[in-house]
């Protein structure tokens, strides 16, 4: 069980603690450093395999956050290193899963899911999150009563681990449209904002992001947990067996309830951490831009899904195409202005922080209309492509709105990005979507030039979801 030189290991651990672990605190920092020291003090054959696996998980996650080379971006060598470290952990997965179960075993498995959720095939991450949650249940991580006898540091870390697993479980559930493992009614654990603190512990602020000027702070970890809860409600209202048997009125009420929850969630995000300015307000830690891109992408995707306005909804995209050709009025979902505003800000953020790295690949998971997944590494980002379609639809119907110039610029930029992505993809559906957007943008530019009108002018059928097919 070999490891890289200690100085290299400590550098990687430092990167991990200052990036991933600072927003999603999978490990207690002091405990992790102690484990690293103890492991390096032993000969390779004497090392604890679970500790060795945990260190390799940390190395793999750190490789995804190594600062980019200004000229060449991240090297293939760094990508290969991530894979190498993950392969080492996978080589002893049976020991981690079938041996005596401790919190560290669960941390290793959760870290593996964080890595595997970026793969082309989500099957390994789905299987692993299921096993992880079952082992977490075995330790009672989901139960407050099971931790009352522990000291505050350990109790807090147990709660953090189960909440990170919960986030991954709900993310994967919505992305694959399969039921999650963890039932909300069986979660009896303090939220990150309520976890105990101690005066002599330097881990109290894990999960909290502070602006560069120090004037504002936000509990990113808590925001992810609350959004994951909403993801579970989106799944329940759209894809669950119960949803299939609901009446149209019940489905509409469920949708409105989810939209209200999303509105409340967005209102809880301080202005300094909104999608439009978070990269400038947290410029002291550039890695935060990527984490907030994931946060706001998830929020936008939830809103688009429940509004039937995402990029892979056949009825929605067909309506956009027909409206651009002047043969159909465009039917818009409720809260249209809110969705468009969210899409615009997300596109601004995405353009600043997009990376081709593996950890960003989950943004490149694309939904088919039939619910299956297109697993293309650099294929169209579902939230980004959804935002492209939303801005295109908004500008097509109202080409003289206040943000027309900015939106056309964002649309053009997204289409160029999509062209590049499609060089590596053979998806007919993605190609058809791009052609629809190009056609709509052409119509928009003709309208702006004043030499094109449609039979419907700028009239849209606003806030009229009843005419759409049931979910």
Image (cartoon, rainbow, N blue to C red):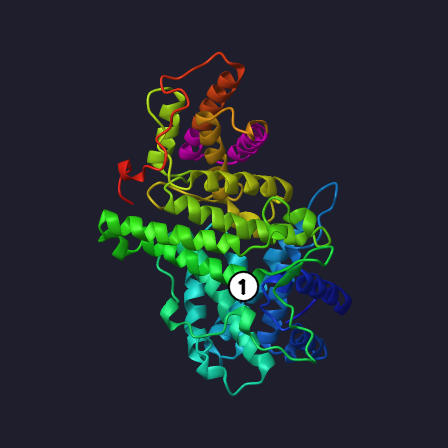
Picture residue at 71% right of the left edge, 52% below the top: 67
Outermost residue on the top side: it is 451
Q: Residues within 10 Å of mark 1 (few under 14, many from 20)?
A: some
Q: Is residue 299 magenta?
A: no
Q: Position of residue 239 (x, y in %)?
A: 32, 52
Q: Residue furthest bottom?
A: 149
Quarter of the image where one finds residue 214: bottom right
Q: Position of residue 215 (x, y in %)?
A: 70, 58
Q: As rendered, which of 134 and 205 lies closer to the eye?
A: 205
| Residue 60 can be seen in this image | no
Residue at x 46%, y 26% (from the top left corner): 398
Taking the spot 46% from the left edge, 20% from the top edge, the residue there is: 443
Between 22 and 131, the one nearer to me in the picture: 22
Q: Is residue 411 above or below residue 383?
A: above
Residue stretch rendered in magenta on the structure: 406-433
Residue 359 pos. (x, y %): 57, 52
In the image, taking residue 445 as reference, residue 27 lies left or right, namely: right
Does 412 appear in magenta?
yes
Q: Which residue is mark 1?
A: 222
Q: Quadrant of residue 145?
A: bottom left
Q: Main secondary structure of the magenta part?
A: helix
Q: Specify whether 336 is left or right of 314.
A: right
Q: Quadrant of the N terminus?
A: bottom right
Q: Does residue 195 lie above or below 335 as drawn?
A: below
Q: Provide the secondary structure element on which disc 1 rests.
A: helix
């Amino acid at each position: 069980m070999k490891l890289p030189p200690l100085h290299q290991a400590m550098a990687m651990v430092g990167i991990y603690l200052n990036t991933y672990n600072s927003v999603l605190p999978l490990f207690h920092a002091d405990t992790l450093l102690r484990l690293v020291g103890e492991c390096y003090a032993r000969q390779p054959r004497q090392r604890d395999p679970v500790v060795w696996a945990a260190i390799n998980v940390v190395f793999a996650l750190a490789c995804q956050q190594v600062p980019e080379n200004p000229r060449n971006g991240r090297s293939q060598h760094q990508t290969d290193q991530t894979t190498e470290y993950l392969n080492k952990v996978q080589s002893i997965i049976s020991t981690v899963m079938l041996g005596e179960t401790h919190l560290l075993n669960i941390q290793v498995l959760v870290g593996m899911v964080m890595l595997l959720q970026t793969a082309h095939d989500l099957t390994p991450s789905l299987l692993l999150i299921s096993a992880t949650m079952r082992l977490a249940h075995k330790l009672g991580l989901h139960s407050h009563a099971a931790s009352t006898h522990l000291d505050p540091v350990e109790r807090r870390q147990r709660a953090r681990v189960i909440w990170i697993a919960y986030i991954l479980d709900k993310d994967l559930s919505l992305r694959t449209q399969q039921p999650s493992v963890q039932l909300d009614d069986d979660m009896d654990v303090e939220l990150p904002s309520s976890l105990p603190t101690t005066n002599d512990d330097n881990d109290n602020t894990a999960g909290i992001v502070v602006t560069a000027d120090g004037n504002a702070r936000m509990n990113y970890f808590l925001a992810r947990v609350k959004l994951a809860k909403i993801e579970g409600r989106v799944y329940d209202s759209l894809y669950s067996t119960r949803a299939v048997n609901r009446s149209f009125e019940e489905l509409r009420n469920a949708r409105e309830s989810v939209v209200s929850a999303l509105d409340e969630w967005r209102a809880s995000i301080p202005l300094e951490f909104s999608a439009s300015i978070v990269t400038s307000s947290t410029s002291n830690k550039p890695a935060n831009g990527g984490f907030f891109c994931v946060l706001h992408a998830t929020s936008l995707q939830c809103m688009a899904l429940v509004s039937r306005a995402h990029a892979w909804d056949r009825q929605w995209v067909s309506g956009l195409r027909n409206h651009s050709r002047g043969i159909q009025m465009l039917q818009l979902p409720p809260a249209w202005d809110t969705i468009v505003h969210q899409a615009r800000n997300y596109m601004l953020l995405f353009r600043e922080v997009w990376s081709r790295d593996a950890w960003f690949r989950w943004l490149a998971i694309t939904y088919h209309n039939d619910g299956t997944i297109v697993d293309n590494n650099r294929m169209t980002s579902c939230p980004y492509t959804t935002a492209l379609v939303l801005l295109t639809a908004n500008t097509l119907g109202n080409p003289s709105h206040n943000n027309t110039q900015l939106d056309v610029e964002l649309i053009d930029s997204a289409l160029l990005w999509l062209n590049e992505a499609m060089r590596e993809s053979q998806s007919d559906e993605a190609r058809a979507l791009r052609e629809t957007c190009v056609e709509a943008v052409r119509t928009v530019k003709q309208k702006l030039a004043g030499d094109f009108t449609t039979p419907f002018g700028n009239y849209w059928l606003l806030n009229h979801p009843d005419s759409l097919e049931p979910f």
